[in-house]
Structure formats: C-alpha cells, structure tokens
Image (tube, rainbow, N blue to C red):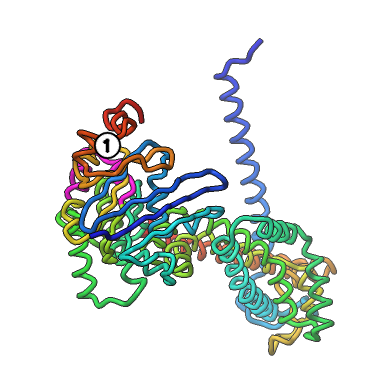
Amino acid sequence: MRISPAITQRLAKGVLILATISALGVLIFVIGFVLAGGFRHISWSFLTEPILDMGRGGGILPAIAGTILMVFVAIGIAAPLGIASSIYLAEYTEEGRVTQTIRFGINCLAGVPSIIFGLFGFILFVVILGFGWSIISGGFSLAAMILPTIIRTSEEALRSVPKNYRDVAASLGATRWQVVTRSVLPYALPGILTGVILGIGRSIEETAVVIFTAGSAVQMPKSLFDSARTMAVHFYILAREGISNENAYATAAILICTILIINVFAYSLMHRLMRGKS
Amino acid sequence: MKKIEIKNLNVSFDGFHALRNVSFDIPRNEILSIIGPANSGKSTILFCINRMIERIPNVKVEGDILLDDRNIHTIKDVEELRRRIGIVYATPIPLPMTIKENILFGPKLKKRLTAAKAGELVENSLKAAVLWDEVKERLDSSALRLSGGQQQRLCIARTLAVKPEVIMFDEPCSGLDPISTAKVEEAMKELKKDHTIVLVTNNTKQAARVGDRTAFLLMGELIEIDSTDKIFTAPSKQKTEEYVTGKFG
C-alpha cells in the first residue's frame, strides 16, 4: 500500500519544522543559560578591575585586554595573508595539479585539531624563535590556525563573482590586477568578511592554542611580549579549577555578548557594502 | 583601406579544431557581418582579434592578425590593444554599479578624470549609443535596473567611452526584442562613420540589414566573403545559398 503524497508532504514538513525548532532551541537554551547565570555578577567594576586572587575577586580587565590584543595580532597577520593567497589561487593560477595540491593541503590544515596548532606554536614561536609565552606567540599561532578558514571562504567568495565581470573589465583594457581590484574584490568583499569574522570568532573562543603559546598570566599585559590570558582561557581556568563559578559565568556571558556584538556589527557592515550593488 | 587583416588563422581548443586557415580583411569604416550556424567559430575570431583568447587555458592559436599593418602579437601592452578594439557581448553585462560608473569604468583604468571631463564623456558615449534621452535623469541609479535593451546599449556606451577604433559585436541582439534590436542597429550604422565594425550574428536578416560586407563561416572554415548584396542575392558557393535561404542552420 502506498502512503498518499499529501500525507508524506505533511509528514516531511512536520519533521523539518521540528528539526529547526530543536536546533534553535538548543542555541537559545545555551545562550540563555549562560546569560542568566552570568549577568547577575556583571558590574562596571567587573569589566574595569584587575584580576585578584587568581580570579576569585576583582574583575577581568587584563583578560579583555589580552583577548583584544591577541585577536588583533592574529587577524592582522591571517587576514592579509589569507586574502592574498586566495586571490592568487582564484585569480592568478589555472586549475591544475599544483592548485589542487595546495587546496588539498589547505583543507587538511582546516581539519587539524587546534591543540596541534598550540603545540606547533609552542615549539616554533615560544621555544625556537624565543618569543616566550606571549601575546605575539599566541597571536601568531592563532593566525596559523585560522588561516585555512580565511583562505577557503575568501576563495569561495572570489569564485562566486560572475566570470563575465572579469571578461568585461579585461576587454575594457584592465590589467589582471585591475580586474581583481575593480571588478572582483568589491563584490567578493561580503564573503571575504564572513571568513574574517569566522576567524575572529574562532580566535576569541580558542583555549588550547592560547594556553600553550601565550600562557595564562593574570597581570595586565604591558607589551606584546608579555604573557596574557584571553577571556576564554580565564573562563576555562576558573571553571575547571573550581575557583569561582560566579565569575566563570560572568566571563562566559561577556564572551557571548562580545561575539554577538561582533556578528551584528559585521552584518550591518556587510549590508552597507552591499547597498547599491544589487 | 583595410583596418584588420587576418592571415591563415588556426585555433584549436583541447584538440578541437575551431578555426581552419581563415584569412580575410576587414575594411575601415565598414560593417562586416560574420554569419554562420552555432559552433562555426564566429566568436572565436573576435576573441583572437582582441587577444581575449589568451585568457582561456589550453588554446592554440596560429596565424597572424594585423591591425593597421602591425601584427597584434608584437603589441606588448595587450591592455592597449583591447582599448583599441572594443567588444560588446551577446548578453548585456552591466557591472553592478551606477550607469555613470559603468561608463567611466574603462576610462578610469587609465587615468583620473575631472568631473567636467567625466560628465562630457558619459553624455557623449550615451548619445552615441542612442541611450542618453532615456537615462539622462538617472545617471546615478543602478545599471541593473535598466531593461535588457537599455542594458545592452549601456554596454555599447561603456565600450565607446574607451574610444576604440574597432568595435566588435558578438551577437548583440540575441536576447532583445525587435524595437531594442532596431535601436542597437541604428547605433551601429551611426558608429561606422568613425569606427570599423565587426558584427557576429546568428540572425541572417540582421546581417542583410546592416552589413556592408558579409562573411559566411561553417565548421571553422570561411566559405565565402563578399558584399552583403552579393552574399544574399547571388552567392558563389552553394553552401552559402543554402544557409542564407534557410535550408539549414
């Protein structure tokens, strides 16, 4: 006996809606849980005071500073490098064995667990290059970790720009570089930005790499060569070592808010970039 | 006076022989139509003339193309060649920017323009493409909002703004209604006063309407080239006659 198409249709629709609701539900639950547990303990002084007594008291200003500095170093290195590589791969090479090998390598790199990047950063930046546990070592290692993501998303963004735009620009006398800068990059920018934002997000939430390469100093970093902890590391240590559950939740809440703010800001920026172009 | 001279042009893509020993001249200030069924190599000739074919991987091009008696392969600055030989594609491809920015895209690649110069260039180019009266009130609105026919004339204006000596049209009216087609053809006839025009078309009637001379291409070979009147009334080859009378194609 066949089930009538009308029933399978209703069934399918029901299952799909249920799946969507449960996915959203998990998200809302997690965010709500952390925010509800954390917001009670957030105050102005929590944001602006130094870490006292390993995190039992005081605020998290050094962790906020450490996060910002490390993410800046990581993005400052990974974004230009990654975008330049993706332009080379998408615009300057012809598809062949070499590009396939490079792309395969990048995809493998994207799947490497972050702890491996931590170990790599520890050996190269901390030990061999002698940067010690520092924001520089942490930033460089995070950059290595997010580089494949940025290259992949940027390359995809570049490839999604219609080939016609390139032909038009070239036939009007544009050099290859002018083709890239004037008729490809402007339209790939939103996609490229998405990759950079993903990279920022991954750097902010990363703990393993940071502990290995930047240490977990509680003092306010005075230069890029000082050890520092990020908010994620601070949260991890507070929670794991049972130092202060309240402060751990509060830190997590601020972490989530930071990521939300970055996303909202990035999307509004993207909208502004897209206006008038579609 | 010949503007372009094509000598023994052979092109193959990945082993597929797209053009075989094609030789002909393109006279100055005339419209040469190139007709022939799909895959006969019409567009390939255009891409050889502006060397856009070099952007396609695995292509072999042999033979010489002379522009004003100079072999185009000895022109080091390929961008300069492409500014001298403009092309308008089959589907209108407005860049996703304003009408004005579209027109100024080509000129700005080479040098900065003063506002006055830019305004003048936009107006002249749009007038030459018979589009000015329809868009003069909204030069700063997106080019994507124009109709298909207007977009195609915008593409012609954009090509003209670079001040090319030769303009090649690659089936420019294939997606247009008869009224838009008539406007594009009107622009072409006007343009031949100062330009050499090559028109690739699937539409034999269009070739008969606007072409001074017509070349008939079949499977990568040049079957016949002659004055348009002769091709359409008394062609010397049987294949040509069969094609222009609609027996195949």
- Residue A77 or A103: which is nearer the viewer? A103
Location of the C terminus of chain B (image quadrant): top left
**Kind of residue sitting beneath label 1:** Thr
On the image, the x and y values in percent for residue B63 come to 45, 56
- Residue B232 in the image: state x and y as whole percent: 22, 35
Taking B231 as reference, is A41 above or below it? below
Q: Is residue B64 left or right of residue B56?
A: left
Percent coordinates x, y for residue B235 in the rendering: 25, 35
SS assignment at label 1: helix
Instruction: Name the residue at 52% across, 54% down.
Output: B60
Chain under label 1?
A: B
Return the residue at label 1.
Answer: B204
Looking at the image, residue B180 sits to the left or right of residue A21; the answer is left
**Residue farthest to the top, as pictured:** A1
Q: Residues within 10 Å of mark 1 (few under 14, many from 20)?
A: some
Please give the name of the residue rendered at 60% of the width and 22% of the height, measured from the top-left corner. Answer: A8
Could you tell whether B68 is left or right of B61 in the image?
left
Q: Decide if residue B142 is in sight here.
A: yes
Q: Residue at x 44, y 71 (%)?
A: B76
Whether residue B116 appears in magenta in the rendering, the answer is no
Say if residue B135 shows up in the picture.
Answer: no
Q: At x 55% / y 55%, what residue is drawn?
A: B57
Please tell me in which quadrant of the rendered image residue B236 appears. Answer: top left
Magenta region? B169-186
The quarter of the displayed image where residue A84 is located: bottom right
